[in-house]
Structures are given as structure tokens and as C-alpha cells.
Image (spheres, rainbow, N blue to C red):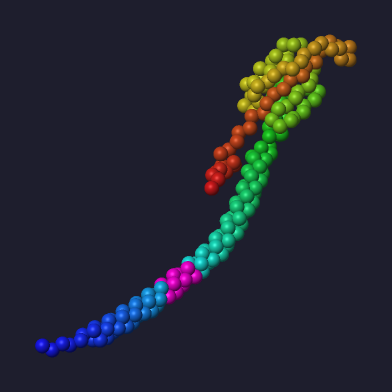
């Protein structure tokens, strides 16, 4: 029988397998490195795109914030103008009020009552005057209460005084002027955003 020494052949096979293993390992390493590089590049590109999109959104948000601030100032100016308009319309609606007040006093003041001073503050009128008797002051208050222009007559003080040798009742009273506020004069109220 013949003896063949297989050791060198096995050694060559081992070397070939080891070389093949290192070659495959190198190829796998290179492929992994390429895949990692491609992944890193793609992710970096996406991050850059997202950063660009974020920067664009921030610039647009800044533009919208400016527009919102302008809208707020315009809304405040509009509200101020509407308030002025309402005041002017209210004044126009009540501009003949003084004439009506004096006409109503002329009609409602009974005989024997003399008005000395009328002072209006807001809607309240202070009436200072003299009457021949306390009953005449009472009649004046009753007449003012029945008036469509006046309401809530309130006697502050009444006292006896001698004027030009005659004994009279000096009085001080307040009466409130009714103001009919028209709904269209006030205008529609707008709700805040």
C-alpha cells in the first residue's frame, strides 16, 4: 500500500480557506463601510432639508407675527374710531336736548315758582329757586316726575327766606334727564378675537 502524505495538501487548503475568509471579511467590511457611508449621507441630507424647512417656517412665522401685530393695531384703531363715531352719533341724537329741557321747564314749572339757577352735570340737573309756598315746590316735583324728559326729582333742601320783603321758600333739588339711546346709534359691539 502506498502512503500519501496529505499534510501539505491540507495545509494548502487551510491557507486557501483562510485567504478566502479574509477576502470575504474584507469585502463585508467594505460593503458595511459603503452602506454606513450611504446611510450617513442620506441622513445628513435629510437633516439639512429639515433644517432648511425649519428656517423657512421660522421666517414665515416671523412675517405672520408682524402681520398679526399690524392687524391688532388696525383693530385697536378701528375700535377707537368706532367709539368716537358712537360718541358723535350720541351727541347728534341728543343735540336738541337743551331746547327740549328748557321747553319742558317752561311747561312744567307751576305759577308761583321762580327758578334762580339751573346747572347740568352729566344727566343730572341741579335746580335752585324760590317758591311762594312749599306746596308749589311739591307741585313742581310732581310735574317733573310726569314729564317724558325728566325722571327722579329729588329735593335736597327747602327753607324759608325773606326776599325783597316777601317770605318765600328757597329750594334746591336735582332731576335726571332721560336719554333714549338708540340701538343703531351705539352700533353693533364686536367681540374680541
* In this picture, residue 143 sits left or right of residue 28: right
**Location of residue 5 by image quarter:** bottom left
* In this picture, residue 26 sits left or right of residue 99: left
Is there any visible trace of residue 31 in the rendered image? Answer: no
Rendered residue at 84%/10% (across/down): 167
Rendered residue at 77%/27% (across/down): 118
What's drawn in magenta, residue-wise?
A: 37-48
Depth check, front residue: 122 or 192: 192
**Location of residue 55 by image quarter:** bottom right
Q: Return the residue found at the far front.
A: 1
In magenta stretch: residue 181: no
Rendered residue at 77%/14% (across/down): 158
How far across and down, in percent of the image, does residue 39 sit? 41, 72
Rendered residue at 37%/77% (across/down): 29
Point out the image quarter for the N terminus.
Answer: bottom left
The chief SS type of the magenta part is: helix
How far across and down, in percent of the image, does residue 22 sit? 34, 80
Amino acid at each position: 500500500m502506498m502512503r500519501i502524505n496529505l499534510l501539505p495538501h491540507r495545509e494548502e487548503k487551510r491557507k486557501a480557506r483562510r485567504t478566502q475568509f479574509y477576502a470575504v471579511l474584507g469585502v463585508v467590511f467594505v460593503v458595511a463601510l459603503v452602506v454606513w457611508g450611504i446611510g450617513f449621507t442620506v441622513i445628513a441630507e435629510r437633516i439639512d432639508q429639515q433644517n432648511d424647512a425649519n428656517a423657512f417656517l421660522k421666517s414665515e412665522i416671523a412675517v405672520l407675527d408682524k402681520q398679526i401685530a399690524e392687524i391688532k393695531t388696525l383693530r385697536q384703531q378701528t375700535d377707537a374710531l368706532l367709539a368716537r363715531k358712537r360718541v358723535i352719533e350720541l351727541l347728534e341724537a341728543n343735540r336738541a336736548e337743551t331746547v327740549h329741557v328748557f321747553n319742558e321747564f317752561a311747561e312744567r314749572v307751576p305759577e308761583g315758582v321762580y327758578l334762580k339757577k339751573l346747572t347740568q352735570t352729566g344727566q343730572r340737573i341741579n335746580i335752585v329757586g324760590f317758591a311762594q309756598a312749599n306746596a308749589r315746590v311739591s307741585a313742581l316735583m310732581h310735574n317733573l316726575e310726569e314729564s317724558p324728559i325728566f325722571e327722579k326729582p329729588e329735593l335736597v333742601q327747602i327753607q324759608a327766606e325773606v326776599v325783597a320783603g316777601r317770605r318765600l321758600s328757597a329750594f334746591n333739588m336735582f332731576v335726571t334727564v332721560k336719554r333714549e339711546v338708540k340701538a343703531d346709534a351705539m352700533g353693533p359691539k364686536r367681540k374680541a378675537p
